[in-house]
Image: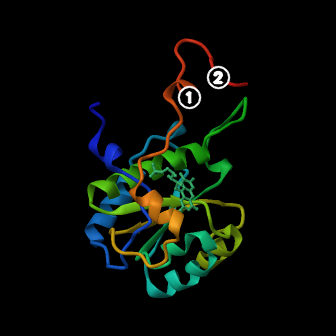
């Protein structure tokens, strides 16, 4: 199938290098993020690109144990938003997290194009990570995107090494894509 190459190639790799990243590539990645569409063009995303040794040292301890593989990444992008920054429509349609997700995917795909891994994670202590970077309490730190070049990683546990080499795991298409009418579980 003719899938966009960056989409087809991207994987949530965990074998990362601590090597410094090209600042121009990082700038393009963040620019790509801000080019995402958003409800009423509200642009509810806020990114904190954490790369100074001091700031990295402040955030790293708040990654979950299972994300020890991420501790040597030279760049952590904190993605923040809050509901009041975006459309809040009937039937649960709060768009801030949705639009922050669209922007994050742009960032991830541009990173792929630049030869970087950009792996989003939810495994971190949000209160402590927010405090470490001065994020106001009413913002949601929805993900940390771990950015790095691929490399060796001594922190990977067995299942993570296996996952690294394995095929993508996906639900069958018919379980998630329906023609004309809902045809899934309630
Ligand atoms: C919102 C979100 C949270 C995730 N959290 C973690 C995490 O804390 N640690 C981790 O190693 N991977 C995390 N992942 C990566 C997923 O496990 C990975 O994307 C999924 O297994 C599919 O694999 P693929 O991205 O290689 O296709 C997360 C991905 C997303 C989108």
Characterize the local packing of mark 1: few (<14), some (14-19) or many (20 or more) Cα atoms within 10 angstroms. few
Characterize the local packing of mark 2: few (<14), some (14-19) or many (20 or more) Cα atoms within 10 angstroms. few
Between discs 2 and 1, the one toward the N terminus? 1
Q: Nearer the viewer, residue 140 or 68?
A: 68
Q: Residue at x 54, y 38 (%)?
A: 39
Residue 2 in which image quadrant: top left
Q: Residue at x 57, y 43 (%)?
A: 98
Q: Left or right of 23: which side holds 121?
A: right
Q: Which mark is residue 143?
A: none
Q: Left or right of 121: which side holds 82?
A: right
- Residue 88: % across, % down: 68, 38
From what the image shows, is residue 137 above or below residue 165? below
Q: Nearer the viewer, residue 51 or 181?
A: 181
- Residue 169: % across, % down: 49, 44
The answer to whether residue 154 shows anywhere in this view is yes
- Residue 153: % across, % down: 41, 75
- In the rendered structure, are the residues bearing label 2 and label 1 in contact, judged by CB atoms less than 8 Å apart? yes
């Amino acid at each position: 199938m003719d899938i966009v190459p960056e989409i087809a190639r991207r994987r949530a790799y965990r074998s990362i290098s601590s090597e410094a990243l090209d600042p121009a590539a990082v700038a393009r990645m963040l620019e790509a993020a801000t080019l995402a569409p958003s409800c009423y063009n509200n642009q509810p995303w806020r990114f904190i690109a954490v790369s100074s040794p001091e700031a990295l040292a402040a955030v790293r301890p708040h990654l979950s144990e299972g994300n020890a593989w991420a501790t040597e990444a030279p760049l952590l992008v904190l993605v923040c938003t809050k509901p009041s920054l975006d459309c809040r429509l009937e039937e649960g349609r709060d768009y801030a997290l949705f639009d922050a997700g669209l922007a994050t995917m742009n960032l991830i795909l541009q990173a792929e194009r630049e030869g970087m891994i950009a792996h989003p994670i939810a495994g971190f202590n949000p209160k402590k990570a927010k405090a470490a970077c001065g994020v106001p309490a009413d913002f949601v730190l929805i993900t940390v995107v771990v950015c790095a070049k691929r490399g060796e990683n001594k922190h990977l546990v067995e299942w993570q090494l296996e996952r690294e080499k394995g095929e993508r795991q996906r639900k069958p298409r018919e379980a998630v894509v329906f023609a004309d009418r809902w045809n899934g579980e309630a």
